[in-house]
Image (cartoon, grey):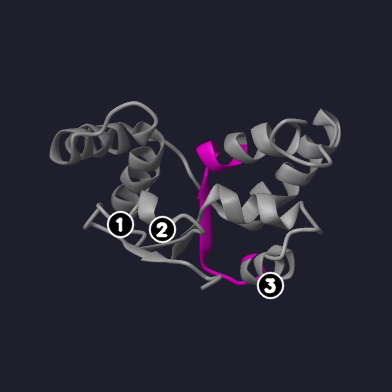
């Protein structure tokens, strides 16, 4: 199983992005997963006029994210996920906004997910527990 990072979901909502078509093709595969955090981060971006050139309404965003949620395995936060997050915080000296990347990695490790697809590989390269793939390079 592979985790889809939020930036790839955002590209799916932006037909003007040079990554749009490839992002749509990427999410049309089996054996992919997301976390609740991915849904929330995507919602934040696609409904924000400062983050997204053509923001969509909250209602439409929620409807579209519900379709996405129903298309993927959704990794929920378990007590063991939080324990893994705490381990990663100590091991990698995670601070500030780094907590969000560490949280995704904690979910991956806890659920046995080996790879993350992301357009921001530098955010995850320090985590030796996972493989990082940039599908756009």
Image coordinates of residue 112 in percent, x first then y, are: 32, 58
Find disc 1 in the rendering and name its residue. 125
Label 1: state its secondary structure: loop
Mark 1 crowd level (few <14, some 14–19, many ≥20, 10 Å Cα): few
**Pointer 3: what residue?**
25
* Contact? badges 2 and 3 (CB < 8 Å): no
**Dot 3 or dot 1, earlier in sequence:** 3
Based on the picture, tell me whether residue 34 belongs to the magenta stretch: yes
Task: Of the two numbered discs 2 and 3 on the same chain, state the one appearing first in sequence.
Answer: 3
Which element is circle 3 on? helix
Distance in Å between CA atoms under marks 3 and 1: 24 Å
Residue furthest left as drawn: 91
- Front residue of 1 and 20: 20
How far across and down, in percent of the image, does residue 69 sit? 65, 47
The percent coordinates of residue 118 (x first, y second) are 49, 58
Asked if residue 84 is among those painted magenta in the image, a careful observer would answer no
Which residue does the image show at 52% across and 52% down from the upper left?
5
Mark 3, mark 1: which one is toward the viewer? 1
Question: As displayed, is residue 132 above or below residue 93?
Answer: below
Residue drawn at x 46%, y 39% as measured from the top left = 76
Residue 132 shown left or right of residue 21 in the figure: left
Between 53 and 37, the residue placed more toward the observer is 53
Count of number-bearing discs: 3
Q: Which residue is mark 2?
A: 121
Q: Which residues are magenta?
A: 27-39
Foreground of the two, 15 or 37: 15
- When asked about the image quadrant of residue 26, the answer is bottom right
- Contact between marks 2 and 1 (CB within 8 A): the answer is yes
Q: Residue at x 53, y 71 (%)?
A: 135
Nearer the observer, disc 2 or disc 3?
A: 2
């Amino acid at each position: 199983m592979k985790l889809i990072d939020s930036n790839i979901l955002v590209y799916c909502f932006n037909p003007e992005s040079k990554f749009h078509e490839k992002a749509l093709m990427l999410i049309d595969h089996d054996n992919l997963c997301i976390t609740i955090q991915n849904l929330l981060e995507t919602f934040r971006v696609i409904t924000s006029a400062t983050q997204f050139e053509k923001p969509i309404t909250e209602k439409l965003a929620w409807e579209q994210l519900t379709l996405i949620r129903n298309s993927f395995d959704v990794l929920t936060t378990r007590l063991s996920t939080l324990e893994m997050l705490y381990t990663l915080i100590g091991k990698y000296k995670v601070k500030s906004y780094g907590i969000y990347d560490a949280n995704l990695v904690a979910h991956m490790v806890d659920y046995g997910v080996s790879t993350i697809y992301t357009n921001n590989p530098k955010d995850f390269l320090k985590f030796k527990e996972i493989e990082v793939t940039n599908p756009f390079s």
